[in-house]
Image (cartoon, grey):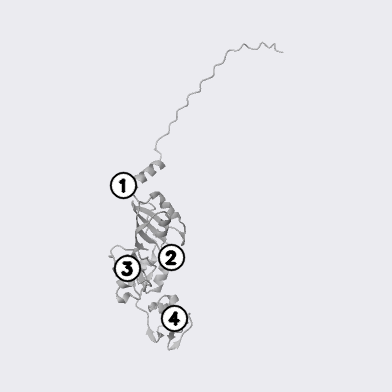
Amino acid sequence: MRLNRYLSACGLGSRRGAEELIKQGRVFLNGQPCLTLGTVVGKSDEVSVDGNKVRPDKGIVIAFHKPRGFVCSRRDEHDRDTIYTLLPAQFHTLHHVGRLDKESEGLLLMTNRGEVSQRLTHPSQGVEKEYEVLLETRFDATQLFKLTHGFHTEEGFAKAERAWMIGDFKIGMVLKQGLKRQIRLMLYFMGYEVKRLTRVRIGNLALKGIPEGAWRELSDRDVEKLLLNPLSKDRPKLSKPKTAAVKKAAEIRSKHRKAPAGPRTFRKAPAAPRKQTRNRRPNSGGGK
């Protein structure tokens, strides 16, 4: 195992943070300072940081139901409550995989397994994240296509993989991107304010069954399922409407799109009346 990955597995931060420790000369391998980033650590090697021996923590992944009002950070410069205040001490070395902003809630994965974090966050993996969004005002179902076609925001080009109606004021969305405050920005540019934003699924793992503020440790089988088949869920772009207003709008659109079946008949147009003219005397042929 490479030294930076080893240090990260010991709960000493991300791999990039571990590289900084190495560059600063704070890491020792078998009693000797180690400044080579690519050093490989064997099973019999002894690693210490600032004079303290370190060993990788047992690999763990938890699914945490983040409540609204907490930030995804160990320390906050504005002294806001962090998610770590809700977790027991043995989980304080875990890193959150991605993040949810302070006003958002729902499923958040936390782990000390670097390979799990890397595979879930790397864009090439395309892991789906599903959200339910409650809006301040009624959503126009005809604008769903704007979410799935995408448009430019101040954070870059943003688009949803799928979007559908849940109710007059509520929509479902699936993202593969991870732009900062992406859903809130997209809807703001379309003229909507988000009242409540909940992440209900990551890959194959659903939030259902985990109470707010609680967590569940994932088994190796759960993690393997999450990593092996992260795209198995599928949603229609527009589900069957569940409220009267949405249903009525869908029926009107459907009526205009579909013409009534059956043979078409054509009536022959009546002939135009012939213009009557005076009888003329035939030419006798004696003209000049």
Q: Residues within 10 Å of mark 1 (few under 14, many from 20)?
A: few
Secondary element at tag 2: helix
Q: Is residue 47 above or below residue 186?
A: below
Residue at figure coordinates x 45%, y 54% from the top left = 149
Q: Is residue 171 above or below residue 54?
A: above
Between the C-alphas of marks 3 and 2, the distance is 22 Å
Q: Earlier in the sequence, mark 1 or mark 3?
A: 3
Residue at figure coordinates x 37%, y 53% from the top left = 164
The answer to which image quadrant residue 176 occupies is bottom left
Between the C-alphas of marks 2 and 1, the distance is 39 Å
Between the C-alphas of marks 4 and 2, the distance is 29 Å
Between the C-alphas of marks 3 and 4, the distance is 29 Å
Disc 1 marks a residue whose amino acid type is: Ala
* Residue occupying the far right of the picture: 288
Disc 2 marks a residue whose amino acid type is: Gln
Which residue in the protein does label 4 denote? 21
Which residue in the protein does label 1 denote? 244
Task: Tell me residue 284's x, y (percent).
Answer: 66, 10
Depth order, front residue of 6/84: 84
Secondary element at tag 4: helix
Q: Nearer the viewer, mark 2 or mark 1?
A: 1
Q: Nearer the viewer, mark 3 or mark 2?
A: 3
Task: Tell me residue 185's x, y (percent).
Answer: 42, 59
Disc on res. 64: 3
Task: Tell me residue 235's x, y (percent).
Answer: 37, 55
Q: Earlier in the sequence, mark 3 or mark 4?
A: 4
Q: Is residue 129 above or below residue 253?
A: below
